[in-house]
Every structure is written in C-alpha cells, then in structure tokens.
C-alpha cells in the first residue's frame, strides 16, 4: 500500500519557528489500587487554569456506568459515566483565585487528584508560524528570559498532530507549565506577550493554550461541517472521508486528480508526463546538484529566489528477482512533495522530514525504473536535500540502492499551485481541527487569538468567508459569543514603487472586514512592525501590547479606549479631491517623517487603475488630490502591498491599517 508520511514533529525550514520539545513533567495524578486508568481528560492536570465566571466542564473516562464524585474549591458534584465510560460534569462558576485541588473518585475506589489549579482567564492562541514563533526568537531575549518568573501565567502547547478524523485527547506528554526562565524560551511569543501585557490591567491568573502549526492554511483548522457550510470543499471532504475508511482507494483517486491537473496544462501529455518512463527521452532536463542542498543554494541565478515547483527524477536498474520485491523509498525534502515510482503514486508529505514511502510489490520492473518527485516550495530551503544516504531504494530483502544522478526541470510559474491532498497536514481539510482543536473538547476559553493568513495569500479570494466560518466553528465548539482577536498580517517582502495588486493586502482587508462586522471581534494592526526580509518579525512585544489593547476594548468593555488606531469611516469625492474621515483617532492624525502621509491610492473600477495620490491631513481627516480624471474614481486604497510603507498614525502612536473603501460622490464643496 502507498503511504502518507505524517509530519507530527518536524516543521519546515520555510516556516522555521518550531518549538523545542518541552520537558516531560509528571501530572501528579494519584490512583487507587486496582484501577490505573486516568479518570480526567489529559487537559486537566497539575497547574491547569480554568475559566473564571464560567461553569467549566470537566470530563474523562471511567468504567462504564461508574458513579463519580468530583470535588473542587469546596464544592462537590456527583455524576455517572455513560455506557461507553465517558463522563462530564459542570463545575460551579468561580471568581479568579486558587490554587485549588480537583479530585475525581469513583464508587469503585479509583481516584485521581490534580493540584495547583488556578481560576482566571484562559486563551486559545492558534494560527501558523507567527503564532508558533517562540520567545527565544524575539527582541531583548536575555532580559525577557531573565525576568520570566510568574506563576500566575500558565502555558500549554498542543503537540502537532494532523488527523483525518476528530481525536478525543491531546497527548499526555503535553503539560501545563508555569512561567519560568526554563519554560518561556520555547513558548509562543505572541501568546505569552499578549497575556503578560493583559495581566497588567486584568490582574488575574492567565492560562495560555497554543494550538498552532507553521505554514498552515486556514482550511485545516476548520471542521468538515464548517467547510461544507462555506462551500466549494465537498469533493475534497468526500475524499478525506473515503481515506479514513479505505486509504488505498482514496490514494488512487488522489493520484488521478493530481495527474488530471497536470495534464490540463498546454503541452502536457501522458507520454511526456514526468512520472512516465516514456518521458526519459524528453529534453529540457538538467543535472540537479543535490550536494549543494536546496535549489536556492545551487548557484543558479534563476533559482536563487525561486518559489514554486521543480520536478526531480532519477532511475535505478533492477534485475527480475529484485524487481519482484516490495521496497521502501527514502527521501528528504522540503516543502510538499508528490512522488511516483514508474508512474505509481507512492506518497506525499509536508516539511523537512525524512520520507519512507512504501512501494508495493508489482510496481518495480526489471530494467530501468523511474523515480519522479514534484516538489513545491513557498519560502526558502526547498526541494530535495540532505546527505546522499537520505535518498535510497531499499528492497524487502535488505538490498539498498543509493539514488544518485538526479535531474531537474522547472515548472512554469504560470501553471500556478497544484492541488493539495485533503489529508495533508497543513494544507489539507480539517486535519488540524481534528488533531489539535477537537481534543480541546468544550474547554472554557475567554477568547481566541488568531494569527494566520500568510499561507492563504496565494488565493485570497475566499479568505473572508473562511475566516467567518472559522469564527463560527470555534463558537460552536467553545460557546458563543466567543471573542476573536485577529492579528492583521505584518509586512513582508519588497516595498512597492508603484500601485499593484497584492494577495497579502487582500487577506488584510478580509481580516479588517471580519473584525469590523462583529462586536465580539477585534483587529490588531501589525503592518508597521513587520520585517521586509523576514516573514517572522521579532517585535512580538509590541504586538502583545496591541492585542491586549484590543482585548481591553472588545472583551473587557473599555469602550473609551480605541482598540487599534485610526479606522476609515467614509470616502467622499468633492470635485477633484477625495476626503477620508477616520474614527478611533486619539488626539489627531500625524504622519511620521513627512507633512503628507504616503501610501494612498485613488482607483477606478478595474485592476491596474490605481494611482498614488498626494495627501493632506487635518484633525481626523485626510484629503486626497486626484491624479486621474475625478469622475473615474470609485475606490481609495491605503498601504495596499505585500510590504507597504505606512506613515499615518494618531497621537497614541497607533497606525492606521491598510484598507480599501468605496468612494461616494457629493456635489458641491465640503
């Protein structure tokens, strides 16, 4: 059977902010003799934090129909396990406090006790690599680690697990940890700095649960039901459901789908397809210098900054007896590969992980055998890599054939990105929801901090609907109206010299609109604290401060505090000028290092119709002078680029974030 390599530990270098393994600490659970089963779900362990003011559910497993007694903070609750052994009970809503002891016991004498449990505010921090990015990669590291001693900040990191079906438990090796110099360096910087800052105005215990995976799209974080509600994902979800029941059949269907995508391109035929042995005579292949590692390091100018797809191929010659055996194909690659042996698809994996693909008996044949690998890279450090020993074909009898003499061919960028298998960890469907969100059950959270979107900038058109679906999905699981704090994407990449289209700007706009439409959502603007040369900006302290400010406004009711700097309210045309009115301005608008704020564009209806506009500001207004025929103006954009230079702030030092707004026309003068 062909195999799929589940990347549950390593993260790709293209989103190189993975966590080091946390020290394994005991849960301190005590059991009565004769029953070694853990009664409580693994979420409930020493040093856990429960949500204040909330009838928190606790749950676990016991013997079927067992009667249970739960004691916590002077309260006693009675319950009974179901016929499947599952039980749950609601604790009384308590104010912030602790430490408390939680004990669960059965009539049969089994007991589990967890200690040092606090009650405060608990946060779910989720997203991709900028949420994963650890404290040890942020600014002022020595001081941050030295000062990290706060037993009222507790941290839990959910291990990376992708699953095709919803899982019930997090791994028992995932532990609640206190804030100490030993524990902080590998914890999520965004989540930690946010909770630390918030605690200055909300002096209660804070629990931080991080479920995040570098390089992940939004779709794998959503349940199958949520994706079906958004629409357009039924085919992939049906294939995912088939994979859970009949893996081999699903993989055959996936092979056909991927090949059909390739063959739909001009000039692509079954005969010249790179996975077909008959293509070995095709020209256009060059030697791949794998001894130099990733293709960006080959010294080939056109590949130095290339992101996209490369094909790799090599051959191995076998005797009839050798070809009759099953085998294992070993490869090391980054970021996503699709791999074939003699046209037979054998697997896909994500990240810089060693692949061990099963090659069933009957796939190999006597003579020349073709191994073809399609590698997709989106950041850097891409393609086949690792020492020569990482690439080999190992027969069932133990014979090993090193794989050398690789060739490569670049796929035209215009062909776009290939489809993703629905069971792929970070770009599949529901896989991370199943493995990392579903195991959180109905844990009590004060809110969600979501930092994701970089991996969806290539096709941003559906991001708003997906983000709305994710919000409703989380509320369905953890209770409505669960507040959601969104981090607007930071800047990354070259700054613009002329107006243009931008997938990053499209995602930022979706984030802005989703936050604006819901009173229980908020947006932290971070475009100005990004890094042109690093997709993982190090100033997570300022991001934490901005997130805490949003929380104070959205969640804690400080309505006098603008949540995140100036926001556009309207754009009105008066003759040959357009006036923008801003709200949430502290003091007045200011522009850094200039009398005229930069980054404003006036646009017509179509793509490519935008022109930079000279701007003047007064109080909370900005006036734009039309560089094009005034009657053709329909839109105004601000800081609309992957990595824009944004200079408009207010006197609180908060930036106006990127936006696009329709222009209305008013006759007469303002």
Image (cartoon, helix red, strand yellow):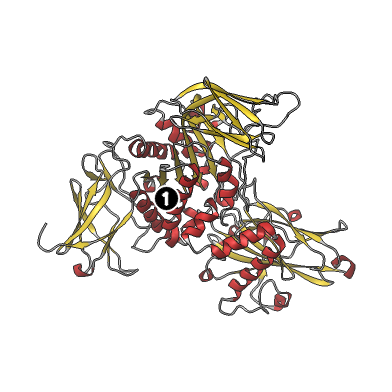
Q: Is any part of residue 475 visible from this angle?
A: yes
Looking at the image, which residue sits at the far left? Answer: 668
- Identity of the residue drawn at 51% across and 29% down: 91
* For residue 608, above or below residue 65: below
Looking at this view, is 150 or 291 the one in front? 150
Percent x, y of residue 95: 43, 25
Looking at this view, is 396 or 589 the one in front? 396
Q: How many labels, in total? A: 1
* Residue linked to disc 1: 489
Left-right relation of 82 to 664: right
- Identity of the residue drawn at 50% across and 53% down: 218
Percent x, y of residue 456: 48, 57
Q: Is any part of residue 301 visible from this angle?
A: no
Q: Secondary structure at mark 1?
A: loop
* For residue 20, above or below residue 380: above
Looking at the image, which residue sits at the far right? Answer: 321
Left-right relation of 415 to 340: left
Quadrant for the N terminus in the image: bottom right
Percent x, y of residue 265: 56, 76
Looking at the image, which residue sits at the far top? Answer: 74
Percent x, y of residue 278: 72, 78
Quarter location, residue 293: bottom right
Looking at this view, is 536 or 475 the one in front? 475
């Amino acid at each position: 059977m062909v195999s799929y390599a589940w990347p549950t530990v390593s993260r790709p270098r293209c989103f190189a902010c993975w966590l080091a393994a946390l020290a394994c600490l005991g849960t301190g659970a005590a059991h009565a003799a004769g029953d070694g089963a853990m009664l409580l779900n693994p979420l409930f362990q020493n040093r856990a934090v429960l949500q204040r003011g909330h009838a928190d559910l606790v749950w676990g497993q016991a013997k079927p129909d067992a009667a249970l007694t739960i004691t916590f903070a002077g309260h006693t609750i009675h319950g009974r396990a179901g016929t499947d052994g599952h039980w749950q009970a609601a604790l009384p809503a308590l104010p912030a406090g602790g430490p408390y002891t939680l004990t669960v016991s059965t009539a049969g004498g089994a007991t589990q006790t967890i200690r040092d449990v606090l009650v405060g505010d608990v946060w779910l921090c989720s997203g991709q690599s900028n949420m994963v990015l650890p404290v040890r990669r942020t600014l002022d590291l020595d001081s941050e680690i030295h000062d990290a001693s706060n037993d009222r900040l507790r941290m839990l990191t959910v291990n990376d697990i992708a699953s095709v079906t919803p899982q019930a438990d997090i791994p028992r090796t995932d532990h609640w940890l206190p804030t100490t110099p030993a524990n902080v360096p590998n914890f999520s910087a965004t989540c930690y700095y946010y909770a630390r800052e918030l605690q200055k105005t909300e002096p209660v215990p804070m629990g931080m649960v991080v479920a995040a995976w570098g390089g992940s799209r939004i779709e794998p974080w959503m349940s199958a039901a949520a994706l079906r509600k958004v629409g357009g994902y039924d085919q992939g979800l049906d294939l995912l459901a088939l994979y859970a029941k009949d893996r081999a059949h699903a993989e055959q269907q996936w092979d056909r789908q991927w090949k059909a995508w390739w063959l739909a391109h001009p000039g692509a035929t079954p005969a010249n397809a790179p996975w077909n042995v008959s293509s070995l005579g095709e020209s256009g292949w060059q030697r791949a210098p794998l001894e130099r590692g990733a293709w960006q390091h080959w010294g080939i100018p056109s590949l130095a900054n290339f992101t996209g797809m490369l094909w790799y191929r090599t051959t191995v010659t076998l005797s009839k007896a050798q070809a009759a055996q099953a085998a294992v194909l070993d490869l090391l690659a980054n970021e996503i590969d699709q791999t074939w042996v003699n046209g037979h698809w054998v697997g896909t994996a994500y990240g810089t992980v060693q692949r061990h693909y099963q090659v069933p008996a009957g796939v190999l044949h006597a003579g020349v055998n073709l191994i073809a690998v399609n590698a997709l890279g989106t950041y850097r450090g891409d393609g086949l890599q690792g020492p020569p020993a990482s690439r080999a074909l190992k027969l069932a009898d133990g014979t090993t054939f090193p794989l050398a003499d690789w060739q490569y061919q670049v796929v035209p960028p215009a062909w776009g990105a290939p489809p993703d298998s629905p069971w792929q960890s970070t770009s599949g469907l529901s896989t991370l929801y199943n493995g990392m969100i579903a195991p959180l059950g109905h844990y009590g959270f004060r809110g969600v901090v979501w930092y994701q979107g970089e991996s969806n900038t290539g096709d941003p058109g559906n991001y708003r609907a997906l983000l709305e679906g994710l919000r409703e999905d989380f509320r369905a699981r953890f209770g409505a109206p669960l507040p959601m704090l969104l981090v607007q994407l930071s800047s990354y990449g070259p700054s613009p010299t002329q107006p243009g289209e931008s997938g990053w700007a499209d995602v930022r706009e979706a984030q802005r609109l989703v936050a604006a439409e819901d009173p229980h959502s908020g947006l932290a603007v971070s475009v100005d604290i990004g890094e042109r040369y690093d997709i993982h900006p190090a100033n997570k302290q300022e991001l934490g401060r901005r997130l805490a400010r949003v929380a104070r406004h959205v969640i804690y009711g400080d309505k006098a505090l603008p949540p995140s700097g100036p926001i556009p309210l309207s754009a009105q045309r008066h003759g040959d000028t357009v006036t923008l009115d801003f709200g949430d301005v502290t003091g007045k608008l200011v522009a850094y290092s200039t009398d005229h704020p930069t980054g404003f564009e006036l646009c017509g209806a179509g793509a490519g119709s935008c022109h930079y506009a000279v701007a003047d500001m007064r109080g909370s207004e900005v006036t734009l002078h039309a560089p094009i025929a005034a009657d053709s103006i329909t839109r105004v954009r601000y800081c609309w680029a992957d990595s824009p230079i944004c200079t408009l702030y207010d006197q609180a030092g908060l930036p106006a974030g990127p936006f696009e707004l329709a222009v209305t026309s008013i006759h007469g003068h303002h």
